[in-house]
Amino acid sequence: MAQTITIDPITRIEGHGKVTIHLDDAGRVADAKFHVVEFRGFEKFCEGRSFPEMPGITMRICGICPISHMLASAKACDGILGQKIPPAANKLRRLINHAQYVQSHALSFFHLSAPDLLLGMESDPAIRNVVGLVQKFPDLAVKGVKLRAFGQNIIRMLGAKSVHPPWAVPGGVREALSADQLEVIRKGLPEAFDTAEIALNLLKDNYDSFKEEAKHYGDFPSYYIGLVTSEGGLEHYDGLLRVMDSEGRVLEPGMPTDDWRKIIAEAVEPWSYMKFPYYKPAGYENGAGLYRVGPVARLNICDFAGTPMADRELRQFRRLGHGKPVSGSFHAHYARLIEILFSLERIQELIDDPQINDAHHLRSVAGPNEPMGIGIMEAPRGTLIHEYHVDDNGIMTKANLLVATGNNNQAINRTVRQIAEAYMNGKAQITEGLMNRVEHGIRLYDPCLSCATHAVGQMPLHIQLFGHDGELVEEKVRD
């Protein structure tokens, strides 16, 4: 009897989505789909706005990663101005971006994923949450909260608030930091480094207990796309696009970001509002052009990190690939912690740079000089693209936003199916633990559906199992 299992909505992610798992007559997985069922339409309602408004508008796509949208948008607006931003503004933008990485990756690891990793994938859902984590590992939970707060505090100092700060503008930024604020950051770094090290050691010490998950949680060949520096180093804010295949061959060593359409195209499917980007030279059919972005992809494509502590961990991380790129998405947990370490090291370098506090020249002022601007950067979740088109008066005529979750859409769907095949085939009953495994596979990509569909919330889980005749066979509701 063919059946369909529906997991709706998915919890501990940002936004609203559901999963359907389709079983054949023998009870084996025939297909699995990750549906994004919300639609927001940011691309369309940006038309007709003045382009300098765009950083303030697009950062409101999301309350989790507003800094990424603000910076990508500001970079696209810089392109419309046809101006380079002042050096101090460049460094300040990098500083706030690294702060965003610290707070976002800390949220993902300590609050969203650690309950599964430390309390058990199939543990009681009543305790498999941040509250249960606080009860069993109070010291670690507090350290995680404080690490995220460290990143948020830097954002707040620069932009006056930690969510939707009106700070990055076309041509630069509004304000620099005071000497006192730099000292506050400097004093907070030792504890932040300590927490990152504790988390890294804890994860690595427990890695052996997740050997099965590492095999089935998104482990498949794919392309990898992301930014690198001109020297091939790990890059989060501004760089060149690099493409690597599953064997580690570099297919595109460093493409200017304005040429992104040469390597990425977008497809659509009738069962999801989210687009399906693919690596253009390989095509879309049968997943041929499936690629991944984000922490694992970034660590695969770079030649080095460029900071001592992150390079040390990167060497260990790459052993997981046995001479090839690390192919398992389960290792995103490890990659995020390495990137926290990298961002903390970069923050330390930036606040010690005398030029960062040059408050005399923070913005290049000009009118619209170009009909199009492209802003590409690495958000914590992966490569983020803002492309704007304007008329002679600087009024938006078209916007295209390709976000990290969209870039990973094909990979998320493949991961859902892989987990379902490994843990649900032939199962007579749909258990809470099995459902959480599917959800965890999605959370590996730290998806942000509000960004990807252009609302927010964690909702209860509703699962329905239907027979081949459409009759409801089983139903579960998580409050």
Image (cartoon, grey):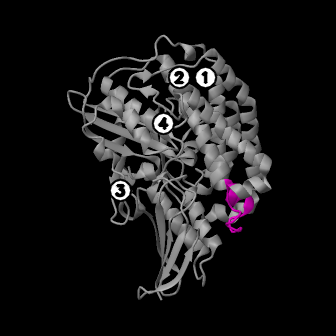
The alpha-carbon separation of the residues under discs 4 and 3 comes to 37 Å
Task: Name the residue type under label 3.
Answer: Gly
| Furthest-left residue in this view | 392
Badge number at residue 350: 1
| Furthest-top residue in this view | 360
Residue 293 pos. (x, y %): 50, 48
The alpha-carbon separation of the residues under discs 2 and 1 comes to 7 Å
* Label 1 neighbour load within 10 Å: few <14, some 14-19, many 20+: some
Label 4 with label 3: CB-CB less than 8 Å: no
- The residue pinned by badge 4 equals 164
Residue 245 pos. (x, y %): 49, 50
Badge number at residue 255: none
Q: Which residues are magenta?
A: 114-130
Instruction: Answer with mark 4 or mark 3, whichever residue precedes in sequence.
Output: 4
- The residue pinned by badge 2 equals 91
- The residue pinned by badge 3 equals 283
Task: Name the residue type under label 1.
Answer: Leu
Q: Of helix, strand and loop, which one carries label 2?
A: helix
The alpha-carbon separation of the residues under discs 4 and 2 comes to 20 Å
Q: Is residue 215 magenta?
A: no
Is label 4 or label 3 in front? Answer: 4
Is label 4 or label 2 in front? Answer: 4
Is label 1 or label 4 in front? Answer: 4
